[in-house]
Image (spheres, grey):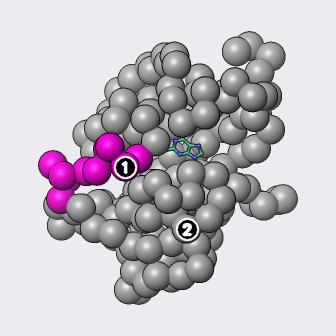
Amino acid sequence: WSNWKAKDIATLMFIIKDGKILLIRKKRGLGAGKINGPGGKLDPGETPEQCAVREVQEELLVTPENISYHGISLFQFTDGYSIHVYIFSATDFKGTPTETDEAIPLWFELDRIPYQEMWEDDGIWLPLVLKGQRFHGKYIFDGDSMVDHELVNLGPL
Ligand code: 6OG
């Protein structure tokens, strides 16, 4: 992984408020059909946090507030594709989560997160987001299947 460089850089944002987490059913792009956090690829000149906010605005028409940075997840697919994802959470937001061309908003109780409808890696690191931890993870995927992973917990935010 030392000379590894991702093809794409992207973000994920998890809004967690009143004991619930705001997820999306993704309508297009990588992982279409799955449940995930809102997020997407970095635009030129944008910081990861700016991208994370913009993507939630575009996908759900809400603006996350009181944002924390949790760390990165690196994904290598066996077909050669790779993506570096910066992960954020927020404890508040402005606006009303609204369906768009890209996503359907879904709220879940924190003990009912639908891991079976999410990317396989989420079950490994999303619990650390909920616990307010920082972390770095690396994951190898063959299509939709995770074939290897390494996760380092870096402690509290
Ligand atoms: P767009 O195609 O929407 O950007 N993403 C992943 N998220 C999780 N939880 N696990 C993965 O494991 C992922 N691979 C990609 C990052 C892609 C979006 O999909 C996320 C971005 O938010 C393989 O522009």
- Would residue 31 appear left or right of 24 to someone viewing this image? right
- Would residue 144 appear left or right of 154 to someone viewing this image? right
Relative to the observer, which residue lies in front, 32 or 140? 32
Badge 1: residue crowd in 10 Å (few <14, some 14–19, many ≥20): few
Badge 2: residue crowd in 10 Å (few <14, some 14–19, many ≥20): some
Mark 1 Cβ inside 8 Å of ligand 1: no
Q: Regarding mark 1 in the picture, which secondary structure is present there?
A: helix
Is 104 a magenta residue?
no
Label 2 with label 1: CB-CB less than 8 Å = no
56 w.r.t. 85: above or below: below
Relative to the observer, which residue lies in front, 37 or 13? 37
State which region is magenta.
109-118
Q: Regarding mark 2 in the picture, which secondary structure is present there?
A: loop
The CA distance from mark 2 to mark 1 is 14 Å
The x and y percentages for residue 23 are 38, 62
Tell me the residue that label 1 is attached to: 117
- What is the three-letter code of the residue carrying label 1? Glu
50 w.r.t. 100: above or below: above
Q: Is residue 14 visible?
A: yes
109 w.r.t. 103: above or below: above
Mark 2 Cβ inside 8 Å of ligand 1: no
Q: Earlier in the sequence, mark 2 or mark 1?
A: 2
Q: Residue at x 51, y 46 (%)?
A: 87
Q: Which mark is residue 87?
A: none
Tell me the residue that label 2 is attached to: 27
Split into 4 quadrants, where in the image is the C terminus? top left
- Would residue 29 appear left or right of 70 to someone viewing this image? right
The x and y percentages for residue 100 are 54, 81
Q: Residue at x 38, y 86 (%)?
A: 96
Residue 24, quarter of picture: bottom left
